Image (cartoon, rainbow, N blue to C red):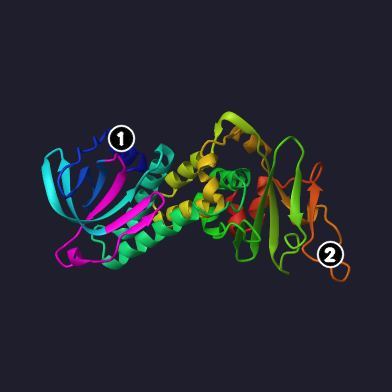
Amino acid sequence: MEALSLIEIFNRLVAPAPSGSKSLFTAVRITPYERYRLGKDADGSPALLIKLDLTESKNTSPPIRLQHLYVAHSLNCEIHHDSGVESGRFTVISCKDADRPMETYFIRVLQALLPTLGENPTPIRVNQAVSHLVELFQALRNPPRKTAQGLWAELLVIAEARDTSTLMQAWHTMPDDLYDFNSGLHRLEVKSTSGQLRRHHFSLTQLQPPSGTVLVVASVIANRAGAGTTVIDLVEEIASRLNEDPDNVLRLYQVVALTLGDSWHQATFEAFDREAARQSLAFFDASEIPMISSQLPQGVSNVHFTSDLTGKTILLATELRQYGGFISAIP
């Protein structure tokens, strides 16, 4: 079942009227995951419910409460289906007190988690999934580590690549890694700017890759547009291409959360002109980047500067393919 279908189904669910001591949900089974239910609670919040067997129902782990995330084990639930009422004990993972963009994001992350959990999840796998969600929602409370524009440019490169999966595998795990893409002997650094000129900020260290490695710089001109494409739009597009690779889909959501932090909500509305950015996308060999001398005076370090790439030689698609590695998967 596609993530969009889950969202459409959730939107059609009618929240139950609260009553009694049980936790009430209106829910549907998620095919083919028969132990899973996509539910809506009495507050209208989305939830994933995982039916427990007799052994698992004795789980006495305390609930987890974070901003927008609530996890409870062995919760006594009453679930209303089209075909009747189901009672039992469930692990409940819900998104609480959130707006529609956050709820939608939560459902999409759940969609990425389901294949990794499997049809009959063990308690260990459930705990691992909960840990992933806790890390993600905690990251959304931290300060941003990059701008939405910078992340948008990286995602654009992935979305426009000929082989999305290969680019994803090379994408950094942490937003502040030295290079945006790094695998084996190949590195790719993505730089973005607004306006018209290709002026980008570099650190001297970035332009001094290890001996024997290849460094390519991608330059993107990203200008805001009211009816443009957002970070979340690109994330959903990339995720749809990785539906056979759930681990990479989950990592995609995690890196986005780590990068944007508490600016995530603002970034869901910050849109850029994709077509203009796509036409501006250009790749340069690191040797083309103007830079200062690497022979620094004693005591000088952490040097940053701005380079203007106007008039520098742009790599052709045929030349990019000759670099090998994940770089050859771009054009």
In this view, the mark in front (2 or 1):
1
- What type is the residue that disc 2 sits on? Ser
Q: Quick one: label 1, few (<14), some, or many (20+) residues within 10 Å?
A: few
- Spot occupied by residue 267 in the image (x, y as percentages of width and height): 54, 41
- Spot occupied by residue 227 in the image (x, y as percentages of width and height): 55, 28
- Spot occupied by residue 256 in the image (x, y as percentages of width and height): 52, 51
Can you see residue 94?
Answer: yes
Answer with the quarter of the image where residue 2 lies: top left
Which of disc 1 and disc 2 is earlier in sequence? 1
List the residue tagged with mark 2: 294
How far apart are the two marked residues, 2 and 1, measured between alpha carbons? 58 Å
List the residue tagged with mark 1: 11
Answer with the quarter of the image where residue 118 lies: bottom left
Outermost residue, top side:
227
Instruction: Say which of 8 and 62 sits in front.
Output: 62
Split into 4 quadrants, where in the image is the N terminus? top left
- Spot occupied by residue 294 in the image (x, y as percentages of width and height): 84, 64
Q: Is residue 155 magenta?
A: no
Can you see residue 163?
Answer: no
- What type is the residue that disc 1 sits on? Asn
Element class at badge 1: helix
Boundaries of the magenta span: 43-72
Q: Is residue 12 above or below residue 325?
A: above
Q: Is residue 294 above or below residue 42?
A: below
